[in-house]
Amino acid sequence: GGIITQTPKFLIGQEGQKLTLKCQQNFNHDTMYWYRQDSGKGLRLIYYSITENDLQKGDLSEGYDASREKKSSFSLTVTSAQKNEMAVFLCASRRQNTEVFFGKGTRLTVV
Amino acid sequence: GDSVTQTEGLVTLTEGLPVMLNCTYQTIYSNPFLFWYVQHLNESPRLLLKSFTDNKRTEHQGFHATLHKSSSSFHLQKSSAQLSDSALYYCAHQGGRALIFGTGTTVSVSP
């Protein structure tokens, strides 16, 4: 088995601040994802990466940057945090055409 | 682009009654790959069912679903709901390497 580790678990930022979320997986999976989870809006894809140094934009990529410098890690940056923003960011990984595994999430609050 | 539609935001029912959650999808791909994920409170989503075979029923943990390409549907069913089935259910479609989720259906089962 393997595990996906997301850090930090809780992130409090200030309006306008650049914030970085990190994700590590030891499944040796090729593809990694970042999703944003908001109540009533489901899981919306922000970025994904099919291999090291690859980046693909999802429908919600505006306002975010991502980086896949190693196969095992995938980071997400909120380029300018929006006031009163609250969401859970989920990282996931998979081999092609197999089950996606999720991390436990990073809960973001912007004050 | 590809999309997944779940029409029910909330389903409330009594234990022992049947449950059906609707899922339809739109895709440019001729061989769709559909999934159901379940997320219990304070947990991450995990795979419940998957299918890429037209008109073949797939089952797991008492739930079942059949992919119908003719109607672009992958509805989730269970004949008798249990209290432990209370959770958030996501339908998802794999288009290329991206995994696109619907908005989710919350199921609440009461005694």
Image (cartoon, helix red, strand yellow):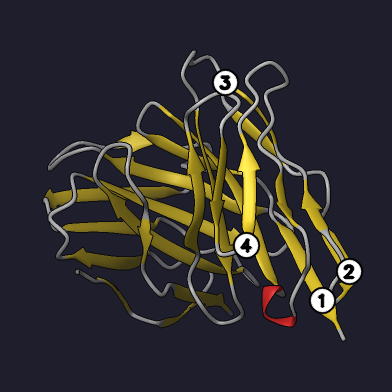
As rendered, which of A22 and A43 lies closer to the eye? A43
- How would you rate the neighbour count of disc 4 (Cα within 10 Å): few for under 14, some for 14-19, many for 20 or more? few
- How would you rate the neighbour count of disc 1 (Cα within 10 Å): few for under 14, some for 14-19, many for 20 or more? many
Instruction: Write down the residue under mark 1.
Output: B109
- Whether pointer 2 and pointer 1 mark residues with C-beta atoms closer than 8 Å, the reply is yes
- Is A104 positioned to the left or the right of A86 in the image? left
Residue at mark 2 to residue at mark 3: CA–CA distance: 30 Å
Q: Please name the residue shown 43% across and 68% down the image.
A: A17
- Whether pointer 2 and pointer 3 mark residues with C-beta atoms closer than 8 Å, the reply is no
Protein chain holding label 2: B
- Of pointers 1 and 4, the one earlier in the residue sequence: 4
Residue at mark 3 to residue at mark 4: CA–CA distance: 28 Å
* Percent x, y of residue A76: 33, 57
Q: Please name which of the two marks, 2 or 3, marks the residue nearer to the observer.
A: 2
- Of pointers 3 and 4, the one earlier in the residue sequence: 3
Q: Please name the residue shown 61% across and 80% down the image.
A: B41
- Asked if both marks, 1 and 3, belong to the same chain, the answer given is yes
Residue at mark 2 to residue at mark 1: CA–CA distance: 6 Å
- Asked if both marks, 4 and 2, belong to the same chain, the answer given is yes
- Whether pointer 1 and pointer 3 mark residues with C-beta atoms closer than 8 Å, the reply is no
Instruction: Write down the residue under mark 3.
Output: B27
**Is label 2 in a helix, a strand or a loop?**
strand
As rendered, which of A84 and A104 lies closer to the eye? A104
Protein chain holding label 4: B
- How would you rate the neighbour count of disc 3 (Cα within 10 Å): few for under 14, some for 14-19, many for 20 or more? some
Instruction: Write down the residue under mark 4.
Output: B62
Q: Quadrant of the C terminus of chain A?
A: bottom right
Kind of residue sitting beneath label 4: Gly
Q: Please name which of the two marks, 4 or 2, marks the residue nearer to the observer.
A: 4
Q: Quadrant of the N terminus of chain A?
A: bottom left
Kind of residue sitting beneath label 2: Thr
